[in-house]
Amino acid sequence: MTHIAPSLLAADFANLEECVKRVTDAGATYLHLDVMDGIFVPNISFGAPVIASLRKKSNLCFDVHLMIKEPLRYIDAFTKAGADIITFHLESCKDPDAVIEAIHARDLKCGLAISPATPVEKILPFLSKIEMALVMTVVPGFGGQAFMPKCLDKVRVIRRIAERDGLKLDIEVDGGINEENVGLTTAAGANIIVSGSTIFRSKRPKLTITKMLKAAKDNPFRG
Ligand code: DX5
Ligand code: ZN
């Protein structure tokens, strides 16, 4: 099943509750929450208190994307804040297995992300241990960047392996996704689509999400 996950990074931070309501009414099923620490990436966004406040206002699936160094330190905080899925970067820590275990010990789904410079081979040993692979389609750190189509080769490799090995794996893509390129991502095997500026800048977010879901349906993974 395909889900559209609007990235809150592109929302009006002075009106978060209203922004979440708007994308919910527009048909989003996930809310993508980008947490940046200014060290792993050169930008600072928001942290657990903001997510905890929104949790009281929303039933969407909270998809927390941690772009922070040594995420193990904060798994508890984001669990308490109300995350449903916690995704961390393979490049951000020394012991990814420990982070995966910590997330699962709290009964949450675990996602593992790779940045554009990371070869797909690095994530393969973890595919059977996680619920979601996040393939970045921009260099993490900022919204509104241009989509990097080359990264879809990694999505294709991961989806083929997941099918071959019978893994129930979600594949998320994140960065620069719009109505025009979303079909390329689903054809490559992605099923969770993050989109920030396209959705939050849209005057008609419902139409935008509907178009994205239709493009996804028209462009399924073909092996
Ligand atoms: C980038 C973030 C993305 C970003 C997506 O580091 O992980 O989630 O907010 O925004 P757009 O869709 O504008 O590229
Ligand atoms: Zn993200």
Image (cartoon, helix red, strand yellow):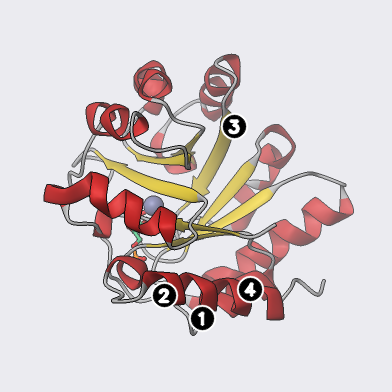
**Sequence-first tag of 3 and 4:** 3
According to the picture, the residue beneath numbered tag 1 turns out to be: 181
Q: Is mark 2 within 8 Å of ligand 1?
A: yes
The residue at 48%/70% (across/down) is 209
Total count of labels: 4
Report, in whole angstroms, how far the alpha carbon at label 2 lies from the one at label 3: 26 Å
Q: Residues within 10 Å of mark 3 (few under 14, many from 20)?
A: some
Horizontal arrangement in the rendering, residue 32 relative to residue 36 (left or right) = right
Query: Which one is earlier in the sequence, the residue at label 2 or at label 3?
Result: 3
Of the residues tagged 3 and 4, which is closer to the observer? 4
Where does the C terminus fall, quadrant-wise? bottom right
Marks 3 and 4 sit apart, C-alpha to C-alpha, by 23 Å
Which residue is disc 4 drawn over? 216
Residue 168: tell me if it is visible.
yes
Q: Is residue 112 left or right of residue 33?
A: right
- Distance from disc 1 to disc 4, alpha carbons, whole Å, reads 10 Å
Ligand 1 is found in the corner quadrant, namely bottom left
Farthest-out residue, left: 14
Q: Nearer the viewer, mark 2 or mark 4?
A: 4
Residue type at the position of mark 4: Ala
Task: Give the residue number, with chain letter if any, for mark 3.
Answer: 109
| Label 1 residue SS | loop
Q: Amino acid at mark 1?
A: Asn
The amino acid type, in three-letter code, at marker 2 is Phe
Precedes in sequence: disc 1 or disc 4: 1
Q: Are marks 2 and 1 in contact (CB under 8 Å)?
A: yes
